Image (cartoon, grey):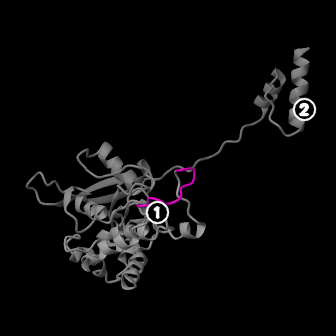
Amino acid sequence: MISNVLKRASVLARSNGIQSAFYTTTAKTEASSTPQMKVKTAEKKDHFVNFQIYRYNEETTAKPYIQTYNINLKDCGPMILDALLLIKNNIDPTLSFRRSCREGICGSCAMNLNGSNTLACTKKITDCLSGDTVKVYPLPHMHVVRDLIPDLSHFYTQHKSIKPWLEPAVDVPRYNGKEILQSKENRHKLDGLYECIMCACCSTSCPSYWWSEGGDGGYLGPAVLLQAYRWIADSRDSIQKDRLAILSEDQMKVYKCHTIMNCTAVCPKGLNPGKSIANIKYLLAHN
């Protein structure tokens, strides 16, 4: 009796195009007699690439040098970070570099690949090949702590100086006593600004930042200035004039930008720091 009910339910489900949860001995036999399609997967071929990597340790007296690692791309993933992890895990555990999210969100693995600043986790090895070689260096014109790790202390100090947080008015109306509402138009003004991940690719590709000795000469650099404009442009903020005053204390903070636009060319998020700096200059001139 139960067997007949299961058979009828299975036939009904198949006739309606629904995969049945009821299977009988007959159904299993029929399924097993159906020939299985074998999907052929393309076998990876050997592809050897030389990774020429900058090595340095400030704790020793040794000068910086380039070390070459021969890697078979068959053995690792497609991104530069995959190759670096393969080298560190299987060949040379002393190789040092920063990494975290592997998805282009944290900005930790920013470095110079074949002469251009970018993120190692989102850059394909095949896009960096020069013949059979990939050159991997730390971000340029920065003090190097070890190997591919630059010292970003001053960079973050500059970022802190522009007050990178919201300062709403005390009496601003709040939705449900918490949220500060913003119109769609005002929200769109933040597009191309809030996506910045502070990877420092733009600042360390900027000749004006190099000439300013990594910002020590007063120039804040494209990354910090883009962040500054992100808060200036936010309609929920109440200290726009104070923010502009901070930037105008020393004209070199902003006006050392010569609109070379290396910053926009290398940004791994496709942002335009040069435009943000131009908007800041306009506001300083009209306020």
- Asked whether residue 174 is drawn in magenta, I would say yes
Residue at the disc numbered 1: 195
Q: Quadrant of residue 27?
A: top right
Q: Residues within 10 Å of mark 2 (few under 14, many from 20)?
A: some
Vertical placement of residue 253 versus 24, above or below: below
Q: For the N terminus, which image quadrant?
A: top right
3D distance between C-alphas at marks 2 and 1: 53 Å
In front here: 142 or 47? 142
The residue at the point 14 percent across, 55 percent down is: 58
Coordinates of residue 112 in the picture (x, y in percent): 31, 65
Residue 232 figure quarter: bottom left
Identified at 20% across, 59% down, the residue is 144
Q: Given the image, on which type of amino acid does mark 2 rest?
A: Leu
Does residue 223 show up? Answer: yes
Residue underneath mark 2: 12
Q: In the image, is residue 42 above or below residue 154?
A: above
